[in-house]
Amino acid sequence: MLLVALMIRLDSTGPVMFRQSRLGFNGRAFKIYKFRSMSVMEDGRAITQATRNDSRVTRVGYWLRRSSIDELPQLLNVLRGEMSLIGPRPHAIAHDDHYAAIISNYAERQHVKPGLTGWAQVHGFRGETADDESMARRVEFDLWYISHWSFWLDLKIIVLTGIEMLRPRNAY
């Protein structure tokens, strides 16, 4: 983590860590930790998702996002009890507000702690949601996970996450 922090510091100006408001278990707000991978620090009512070839992503940030190393500081959120290793990925509150208004069962994802990785992510539903249908599919996978949770399913997701890290689909 110190090496990553040094790389970020040498690559661009600004803080090493990025904090953003997210909703967790039962809609309780918390600040998620990430290594800063962009030139902006958005946290408010209007947040633009990263897209392929996004000019806001720094040179080191590109590598961090592709390898998912930018997510490593979320282990602090796990230790604080705000997140779990496995569960639905939390979204920015601005995105929660948008999708809760158009996807009827969207808020059901908050009946469990959000996770560092989840069933939707290992099935390719990570990163940018270019349209509402993409988010609806992600929510379907999240709700399937919540309904079918088991220790063995979590182990399977951990293994599949390792495989996904080797072929970073939709990570930019």
Image (tube, rainbow, N blue to C red):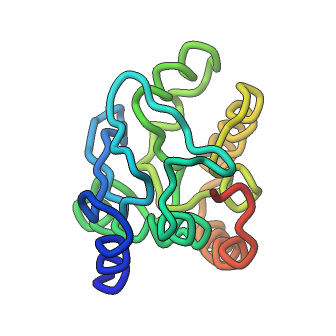
- Residue drawn at x 58%, y 73% is 67
Q: Nearer the viewer, residue 127 or 62?
A: 62
Above or below residue 104? Residue 151 is: below
**In this rendering, position of residue 165 left or right of residue 59:** right
Q: Please state the horizontal and vertical placement of residue 11, each as a whole percent of the image.
A: 38, 70
Q: x%, y% of residue 4?
A: 37, 79
Q: In this view, does 80 lie to the left or right of 149?
A: left
Q: On the rendered image, what quadrant is the N terminus found in?
A: bottom left
User: Residue 88, relative to residue 79: is it above or below?
Assistant: above
Asked if one can make out residue 25 in the rendered structure from this viewpoint, the answer is no
Q: Which residue is drawn at 76% across and 57% down?
A: 123
Coordinates of residue 63 in the picture (x, y in percent): 56, 71
- In the displayed orientation, state which residue is furthest to the bottom: 3
Q: Is residue 135 left or right of residue 46?
A: right
Which residue is drawn at the image coordinates 44% and 59% (left, top)?
37
Q: Is 8 or 101 nearer to us in this picture?
A: 8
The quarter of the image holding the C terminus is bottom right
